[in-house]
Image (cartoon, coloured by chain):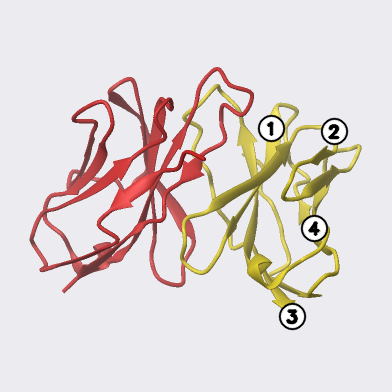
Chain colours: A red, B yellow
Amino acid sequence: EPEVTQTPSHQVTQMGQEVILRCVPISNHLYFYWYRQILGQKVEFLVSFYNNEISEKSEIFDDQFSVERPDGSNFTLKIRSTKLEDSAMYFCASSDSGAEHADTQYFGPGTRLTVL
Amino acid sequence: DAKTTQPPSMDCAEGRAANLPCNHSTISGNEYVYWYRQIHSQGPQYIIHGLKNNETNEMASLIITEDRKSSTLILPHATLRDTAVYYCIGVVTQGGSEKLVFGKGTKLTVNP
């Protein structure tokens, strides 16, 4: 069964450094998302992406964040200058269009980001 | 999107049915009820969704009341691996790119 994959599973970085989290969505999906979950808190929406542009973003997704689909398979989240409060699990998700379950989002296993 | 209300926690004996309730009294006519679960810090896993009719798949059944103000997710024979946080989410389908708004969900513990 096709699945969303994410790399790395765990990323440790120093405050102020740039990080890039990578995701490979399900191959025929067209909509892509990033969510994050700070330890012990709710899963929060960050951004959605379709047709090579951002569809919607939350107030969390400020100028320090960017997303890109650099090729036909990868979807990345970049944090330009990490802060301690960026420490969280980051989940990528994707969904199809034109299918019966068009809005069903399938999530990856997550990347645990630790900012020191 | 409708605000959903779920009990914070529930227990269930292994092998028994787990019935997880969700109230969504403000749900709009074109809003689907989606259920996801999250097993200990893993990525949320899609379970099932429905609009008006009851639905069943290989994982669970979803019973939606006629007035659509509440629903129940049924895991017919709960196993220890079903221990997770279960989220009920209202989603207005737009053919894609609708964000999911997660609440605190129900922490289901399946006991041996």
Residue linked to disc 3: B111
- Which label's residue is closer to the chain start, 2 or 1? 1
Marks 4 and 2: same chain? yes
- The image's mark for residue B31 is 1
Task: Give the alpha-carbon distance from disc 4 to disc 3, as whole Å.
Answer: 19 Å
Pointer 4 or 2: first along the chain:
4
- Tag 2: residue type? Asn
A65 vs B60, left or right, is left
Residue at the limit of the structure toward the top, as seen here: A98
Q: Alpha carbon of mark 2 to alpha carbon of mark 1: how far?
A: 13 Å
For the residue labelled by badge 3, is the local secondary structure a helix, a strand or a loop? strand
Question: What's the distance in space between the residues labelled 2 and 3, CA to CA?
Answer: 31 Å
**Which numbered disc, 2 or 3, marks the residue that appears first in the sequence?**
2
Element on which disc 4 rests:
strand
Secondary structure at badge 1 equals: strand
Q: CA distance from mark 3 to mark 1?
A: 34 Å
* Residue at (33, 20) in percent of width and height: A51
Q: B87 or B26: which is nearer to us?
A: B87
- Give the Cα distance between marks 4 and 2: 16 Å
* Residue nearest the observer in this picture, B36 or B7: B36
Instruction: Give the residue displayed 42% in from the left and 49% down from the top.
Output: A108
* Residue at the (79%, 74%) spot, across then down: B14
Crowd band around label 3 with a 10 angstrom C-alpha radius: few (<14), some (14–19), many (20+): few
Q: Nearer the viewer, mark 4 or mark 3?
A: 3
Residue B53 marker: 2
In primary-sequence order, the first of circles 4 and 3 is: 4
Kindly give the residue lying farthest to the right in the view shown. Answer: B66
